[in-house]
């Protein structure tokens, strides 16, 4: 079907109109954005304490000075996040599957899974970090590390594992029963149906809420500072109380933002690619 | 052609997806009270043509006029056009989270600003007329395919559209359920409803259509009254198609 086709005059005119409409939308959007942000920014600088605020929170000198320490500490946050994330995904999926299991033999596992999610979602993460990082080493257990960094990580895994388990479970529940039926009709066992049919679909569906939890986890790695771990947050607080200047907090904030934004964009892209492949133009 | 009665006029309509051209130079006129049946094999462009008519698809070229006004102009608000056109899909597309009644009153209330009581009275009337009185408060998934499709027809009719687009509405139904839906469509045709119908039901097209269009590879190869197109077609392609779908003739 490669016959020559040139758009009619009417179509060219329509394209012109659409182009103008598009330009108009872009201009409007830009103008509105500039005005809104401009007014908001201007409003902030009019506040009576603006000068004080600028000195204590937005001092370029202090930013430069606190930067190396915070960067050093931030590595700890990143490592913690990356390691915890893997364990959280495994734990979360395992707990979700345990709650879905229908085998009579697995009943105790199901009960444990329910109790685990209920308890660990209910306990504030900061409390969990304190108890694990300070409490467990105090037990003087032979052969176990007393490093608060590790135990704070364990606390994060346990806390987020419970949340992520619920996300996975809702994803699994959202897959239509007809999928399980058709897998069963092909002779797959319930476990195989989960493994090859339900879970792969469920995982795709829960990517956005999972991402949400991971952004949250990235920030919550700062909670390890309460257990005396020298992470970015600890460094910032240290700097702040030493110099009576809180610019270091703003610097930490920027570090966390710089980490989370690319992750969010990456997940958007991944999601879109899957959707395009599976829907392939069908509506 | 342009005797003022034409409700819908298509001129040189062209639509493609990427390199694939789905509609070539389609010309078609639908007068008020016409029932135009689009026939042709799957992929011949019937559904795309219907979707172009209520601007669910943007044309690559050509003009569509509705009630004398060009609706393919980018300055036309598609919602104003769609308010006056009803559409029913092959897969019903009822909203699963709403009861049948709420499915039917959604557009009248939210788009046309009809009061709740009035919208519900009207919907109940139509649902009763279509034999769905006992299913009014159920959710769509509790209904059979035929009942769902009848509910979808009511949903489309509740806004009082000037033209109805039916996209293979019996294709997903069991043979014994096809009849109950087609009977209703026949009734609508007799009542003078203007319709454009993509269908595989040749007997329905023969009995109800005022015009039958045979689409092949995105072109209308042949159009005319059913007695011509379905009985003594001009084109060899049409004959081939009819031989396949009408084994008896």
Image (cartoon, coloured by chain):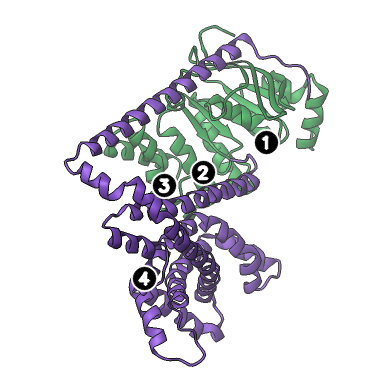
Q: Are marks 1 and 2 in contact (CB under 8 Å)?
A: no
Q: Chain of mark 3?
A: B
Residue nearest the observer in this picture, B112 or A60? A60
Of residue B234 and residue A189, the one placed in the foreground of this image is A189
The numbered mark, 1 or 2, whose residue comes first in the sequence reads 2
Q: Say few, some or many: other residues with alpha carbon within 10 Å of mark 3 (under 14 / 14 to 19 / 20 or more).
A: many
Residue lying at 55% horizontally and 40% vertically, measured from the top left: B181
Residue A146 occupies quadrant: bottom left
Which residue is labeled 4 in the image?
A: A125
A187 to B150, vertically: above or below: below
Q: CA distance from mark 3 to mark 1?
A: 27 Å
- What residue did someone put label 3 on? B100
Where disc 1 sits, the SS reads: loop
- Identify the residue at image location x=65%, y=63%: A182
At x 45%, y 25%, the residue is A26
Q: Residues within 10 Å of mark 4 (few under 14, many from 20)?
A: some
**Relative to residue B72, is residue B180 depicted above or below?**
below
Q: Nearer the viewer, mark 1 or mark 4?
A: 4
Q: Are marks 3 and 2 in contact (CB under 8 Å)?
A: no
Q: Secondary structure at mark 3?
A: helix
Colour displayed for chain A in the image of the structure: purple
Closest to the observer: B77 or A86? A86
Chain that appears green: B
Residue beneath disc 1? B200
Percent across and percent down for residue B233 are 77, 21
Residue B176 is left or right of residue A47, and the answer is right
Q: Earlier in the sequence, mark 3 or mark 1?
A: 3
In the rendered image, residue B190, in percent from the top left (x then y), is placed at 52, 27
Q: Earlier in the sequence, mark 3 or mark 2?
A: 2
């Amino acid at each position: 079907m490669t016959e020559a086709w040139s758009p009619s005059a009417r179509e060219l005119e329509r394209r012109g109109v659409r182009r103008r409409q598009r330009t108009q939308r872009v201009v409007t959007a830009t103008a509105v954005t500039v005005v809104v942000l401009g007014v908001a920014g201007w409003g902030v600088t009019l506040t009576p304490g603006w000068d004080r605020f600028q000195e204590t929170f937005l001092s370029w000198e202090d930013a430069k000075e606190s930067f190396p320490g915070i960067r050093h500490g931030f590595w700890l946050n990143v490592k913690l996040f990356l390691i915890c994330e893997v364990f959280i995904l495994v734990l979360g999926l395992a707990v979700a599957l345990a709650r879905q299991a229908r085998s009579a033999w697995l009943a105790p596992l199901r009960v444990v899974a329910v109790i685990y999610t209920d308890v660990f979602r209910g306990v504030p993460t900061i409390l969990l970090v304190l108890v694990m990082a300070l409490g467990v080493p105090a037990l003087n257990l032979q052969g176990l590390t007393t490093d608060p960094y590790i135990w704070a990580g364990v606390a994060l895994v346990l806390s987020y594992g419970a949340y992520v388990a619920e996300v996975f479970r809702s994803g699994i529940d959202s897959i239509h029963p007809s999928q399980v039926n058709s897998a069963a009709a092909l002779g797959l066992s319930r476990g195989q149906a989960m493994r090859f049919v339900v879970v792969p679909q469920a995982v795709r569906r829960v990517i956005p809420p999972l991402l949400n939890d991971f952004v949250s986890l990235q920030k919550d790695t700062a909670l390890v500072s309460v257990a005396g771990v020298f992470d970015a947050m600890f460094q910032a607080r240290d700097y702040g109380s030493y110099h009576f200047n809180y610019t270091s907090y703003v610097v930490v904030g920027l570090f966390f933002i710089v980490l989370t934004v690319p992750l969010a964009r990456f997940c958007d892209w991944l999601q879109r690619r899957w959707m395009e492949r599976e829907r392939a133009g069908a509506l | 052609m342009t005797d003022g009665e034409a409700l819908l006029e298509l001129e040189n309509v062209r639509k493609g997806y990427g390199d694939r051209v789905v509609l070539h130079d389609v010309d078609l006129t639908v007068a008020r009270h016409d029932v135009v049946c689009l026939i042709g094999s799957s992929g011949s462009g019937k559904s795309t043509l219907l979707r172009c008519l209520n601007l669910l698809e943007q044309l690559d070229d050509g003009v569509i006029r509705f009630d004398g006004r060009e609706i393919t102009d980018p300055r036309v608000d598609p919602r104003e056009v769609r308010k006056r056109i009803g559409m029913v899909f092959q897969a019903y597309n009822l909203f699963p989270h709403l009861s049948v009644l709420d499915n039917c009153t959604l557009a009248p209330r939210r788009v046309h600003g009809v009061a709740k009581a009035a919208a519900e009275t009207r919907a109940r009337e139509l649902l009763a007329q279509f034999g769905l009185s006992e299913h009014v408060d159920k959710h769509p998934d509790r209904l059979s395919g035929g009942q769902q499709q009848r509910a979808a027809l009511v949903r489309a009719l509740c806004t009082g559209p000037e033209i109805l687009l039916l996209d293979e509405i019996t294709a997903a139904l069991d043979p014994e359920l096809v009849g109950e839906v087609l009977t209703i469509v026949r009734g609508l045709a007799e009542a003078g409803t203007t319709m454009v119908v993509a269908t595989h039901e040749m007997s329905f097209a023969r009995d109800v259509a005022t015009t039958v269009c045979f689409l092949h590879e995105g072109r209308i190869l042949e159009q005319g009254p059913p007695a011509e197109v379905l009985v003594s077609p001009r084109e060899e392609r049409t004959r081939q198609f009819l031989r396949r779908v009408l084994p008896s003739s």
